[in-house]
Amino acid sequence: MRSLRLFARLVPFVLRQLTRRPMRSLLTGAGVALATLLFVAVRAIDAGVSNATEATAKDTRLIVYRANRFCPFTSQLPQHYVDRMRRIDGVVSTIPIRIVVNSCRASLDVVTFRGVPDAEFERFVLPGLRLQSGSLDEWLRRSDAAMVGTALATRRDLRVGDRFNAAGVDAYVAGIIDSDEAQNRNVAFVHLSFLQEATRVASSDSGTGGFVTQFTVTVRDPEALTRVAEAIDAEFARDPAPTSTRAEKAFVARAAADIVEVSRFAQWFGIGALFAVFALVANAIALGMHDRVRDIAILQTLGFQPRVVTGLVIMEGVLLGVTGGAIGALGAWAVLRAFQFNLTTEGVGVEFPASLSVALFGWCIAAAIGGCASLLPAIRAGQREIVSSFRAV
Amino acid sequence: MKSEAFIECRQLTRTYRRGDVEITPLRDLDLSIDRGAFLALMGPSGSGKTTLLNLLGGIDRPTSGSLHIDGEPVHALNRSRLAAWRARTIGYIFQLYNLVPVLTAYENVELPLLLHALPRRERHRRVAEALELVSLSDRHDHYPRQLSGGQEQRVAIARAIVTEPPLLLADEPTGDLDRASADGVMKLLARLNTDHGKTIVMVTHDRQIAARAGQTLMLEKGQFIEVEAVP
């Protein structure tokens, strides 16, 4: 406690030392801020991928896709499959969904329409959504109405009453919805019949009405997931449009595999960013100690104990880490929050969340690395012989 | 009743190694200094004056022998205890002032007080008193670069006395000053000795400056060769 109070009294002294070479401290702080920003952004990508592939996918849900098809553009299943699926033992509900995206490739600005029958939307989808603005009545009344997720609405600057067009679908914003599931925050829910009709008109082929992209099947018992999936695929194996059924988690993980690879690659940038923080602070502190051999000797002469001198130098490193880290972490948080980045591939969206806990983690890491980076020069400063220090300058 | 000396050195030896060469600036030195003395150390370069001052100040350690100051076995203290002892006992005045350039006069004087658990108000009172004593009350907010050499040395003296140590050590305190400033600094040291009871040990090359002390010890090759007492 006494030591804490002592170091608290010495904080202004440490701050004054950091202003001794303002340009050096500024550049070091800026470097730490940039590296922390990069680190927090990478952590956000990682958190987004984890969130998409693990946290929000349900253990009781299956996704039924057209066999050997991996993109909403090419997965077409007859809507009437729904009745046969509902008869399979263990199935609780089946939602036929038509998915239309304006790009099947991994992109930061993909608009995803999910066409869902009205009854299924009200019964199974709506309970997981929170209406931010607009009304359900308006959505039910208008055939071209869309319930737009908050992330998509923010990215496209959409408000209730606006019209927007993507992938040849012209929709009216009837409501803005939020959800705990990242997938729902980045889509526009529209009427299935409307989407089938809109894409039939928009496409030049013979028409896609009566077809859906996938079925979302909820099963009663998570243990029965594999059995039900196999039963569904067996049911449609001899049909013109055979199915491929996977657990939602596995489906999302496969669809997001490219993003997971990107995320793994980005992890190296995150580690590199931490090394950058370490190198920047260590360099600044080492140069500072070189400049201040005499000042350290003065402090020792005045009675500053080795541990106090060591503590002062570590405080400098921590303050550089804290200051630069705070700017970087807050900057990353603000950028992620402002731009609501969302990488979508094959219709599966991965949101990069602006999480305060991730920013706080980045900030703490920057501060800790600042302290670690200054440890060696700090110990050396504390152990220097006073007389030889005075002789050296 | 026999009174114990304030500073007691016995067989004090300091040996350095520079490469293969062994240098012994102080050899088997015996010295006793009474409390309240004002002592000048003189001698040619390399005679061991500064080495003796550094040993007395606890910023260097003897190779052998004993050193007791105010009853404390300074030679036997470890680094941390020695630092704590310096903070309590020693006020050090350097030839080149050695103020911290990024701190104001006030902050430089306050620096050693930060080691002590004193309320801010008490710290302020002591700093103000010390700066008043060296006649620099109007220079609180000046940085060292904004002060003359004489003023910088007076700030250094204020820093040395602010913790109220019983022993002041001065290494050529007037060596970098003009005659008028040197005279001011010497008057101040004399006042600290007579009015405030500080024991002062001062290294100087200047006979006139040495004459202002109560006693002068001449050192040569690490040994005392002469003692002059001012009547």
Image: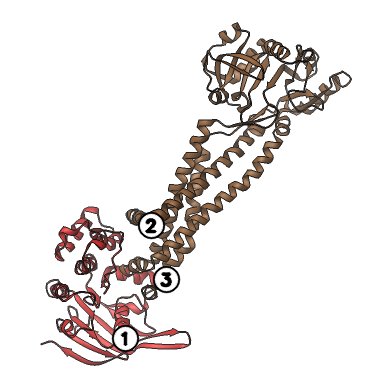
Callout 2: SS: loop
Give the vertical position of B187 relative to A344 (above or below): below
Residue at x 42% of width, y 66% of height? A290
- Colour used to depict chain A in the structure image: brown
Amino acid, disc 3 = Arg
Which mark, by number, is residue A384?
Answer: 3
Which mark, by number, is residue A204?
Answer: none
- Colour used to depict chain B in the structure image: red
| Parent chain of label 1 | B
Label 3 environment density (alpha carbons within 10 Å; few <14, some 14–19, many ≥20): some
Callout 1: SS: loop
Q: Identify the image quadrant of the C terminus of chain B.
A: bottom left
The quarter holding residue B82 reads: bottom left
Residue furthest toward the right? A238
**Residue pointed to by mark 2:** A21
Residue furthest toward the left? B231
Callout 3: SS: loop
Amino acid, disc 1 = Gly
